[in-house]
Amino acid sequence: MIVYVMFVLVPMGFAFYYSLFRWRGVGPPTDFVGFDNYVLAFQDPIFIDALRNNGIIVFGSLLIQGPIALGVALLLNRNFRGRTVFRLLAFVPYVLAEVTVGIMWKLLLSDAGTVNAFMQSLGMGGLVQAWLADLDLVIWTLLFILTWKYVGFAIILLLAGLSNVPQELNEAAAIDGASWWQTQRHVTLPLLGPTIRIWMFLSMIGSLQVFDVIWVTSVPAVRSLGASATMATYMVDSGFFARLWGYGNAVAVILFAISFVAAVLFQRFLLRRDIEGAITRKAN
Amino acid sequence: MVTANAVPSPTAKRRPMSWGNPLTYALALAVAAVSITPVVYVIIGGFRTTPQIVADPAGLPDPWVWDNYARVLTQSDFWRQVFNSAVVSLGTTLGVVALGVCAAFVLARYTFRGREVLYTFFTLGLLFPAGAAILPLYLMLRDLNLINSYYAVILPQVAFSLPLTIVILRPFLTAIPRELEDAAAIDGTGRLGFLWRILLPLSRPAMVTVGILAFVTSWNAFLLPLLVLGDASLHTLPLGVQNFSSQYTSDTAGILAFTSLAMLPALIFFTFAEKQIVGGLQGAVKG
């Protein structure tokens, strides 16, 4: 309890306090500027880009990972030999550290990297790109990497949810003459509802805060032009490395506020039914 | 049956495994290929030399060279980072499990005013964007003189893992029937004895799940160590990978080898823990 309050709640209070100052992190903050840092942030093109990038990542993740994960989970939930091995393989990307994943893709996608060389050798030289250096392309490349990395998490959750769908229901549906597809559509999916909503929630919060993969894959130059910055990377860049603590903390508070509002809205409209839902169902 | 919820019900019998149809395998293979090809490429790439890679980025090693891996494995930096990661992750895991069990125990088995408020307070932590607090957290740790110590990573990580831990553990502890507690009381076991002798053994699967999640999260953590472990001798593996790759940019083969070795522990660990994680989540879902 004390640990929790001290290391989670107290810092957030301080973030707000510091954000009201122009402060370089040395000595107590004295130069009170009120909400200037916030005004500054919303006039700052890089911050706006970071917001847009976070938006792309949130919606991109939900719209791309959801269907893929659902398909793969349904596939891997069928009974067939070797299923365990395939499950393990599908989870591999999720287990790897963000940093290793980032560096791996950075090598694969560099100008003279494997992906480009591979395309060349397939005679698709026209598709060769500066995947991580092209200012317009980089955020989509990152979205691809994030999808590759995190889709396994959705699959794990969905498989756990699927294993709770009683086999009898599927069999009953089959006896009633429902095709495999109809069974999934009308029996399995509705029962997965709570799991899907929990995943959407976790994915949304995660996407808003994404840092590691972006930090190690994208060159600081690209990031500082806003092409691949997210709120979290911008916060660390400006607060910790540029020593603009007041400003960095203002970005932190905005990030916090956006995540929090999104979370509360989501909780209110979608998760309410499952509040004792997928993770805590039948607590009593 | 008092423990029915902890044991899979015998009626949920599985259909016997059969060979699936070819389409299933084709799809499953495609999924597997997409997820592991890049990883396999990196591992194999570590067996090549940088000139080989430059000449033909997509080729196979010819000949296979062990030198890159040998170089990394004989580096004292690498082993120190492994050691640091292990200390930090084990410390975090112990802290999370110990504190998580205590908090969940109180929230599950004691009735007191404000209990639900307190629980909601913790579940709110799930909504809490941990990353947003990192700057003031850094300042606070600096004021506490904890920067450049293992505690600077362990304590915050424990704190940030608590909400999820409590949300997973509490239903487990609640589900254990009161009759057991009464029986224990009649046998002269106090509340703490009940916790120690009956609840803990019964909720072990949930605790293992929680522990694994905390361990893996901590092992992979990057942002917090990046900010609070300025001292290179305390760097954890993710920081090491990052340093190595920016320090030896032209040594592609070396980076590939270092990256492979850095992912190995996570892969091995996960291979053994996968059943437990999925099983534990199921357990939590079933309550």
Image (tube, rainbow, N blue to C red):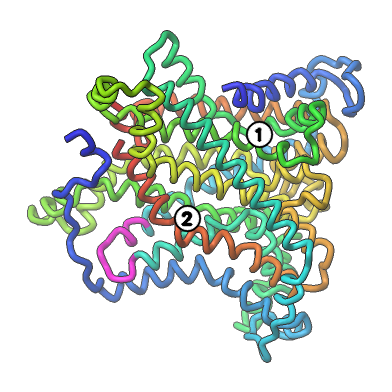
The residue at the point 47 percent across, 51 percent down is A153
Marker disc for residue B156: 1
Tell me which chain the residue with mark 2 is part of: A
Residue with the most extreme top position? B113
User: Amino acid under label 1?
Assistant: Pro
Residue B244: quadrant of the picture? bottom right
Q: Which residues are magenta?
A: A73-83
Question: Quick one: A43 or A234, which is closer to the camera?
Answer: A234
Task: Chain letter for mark 1, please.
Answer: B
SS class, disc 2: helix
Could one spot residue B5 in this view of the protein?
yes
Residue pushed farthest left?
Answer: A176
Against B233, residue B41 (above or below) is below
Any mark on residue A152, and which? 2
Relative height, residue B112 to residue B167 (above, below): above
Instruction: Name the residue rendered at 25%, 27% in the picture.
Output: B180
> In this rendering, would A93 be left or right of B61?
left
Q: Where does residue A258 sit, x and y in percent of width and height? A: 61, 28
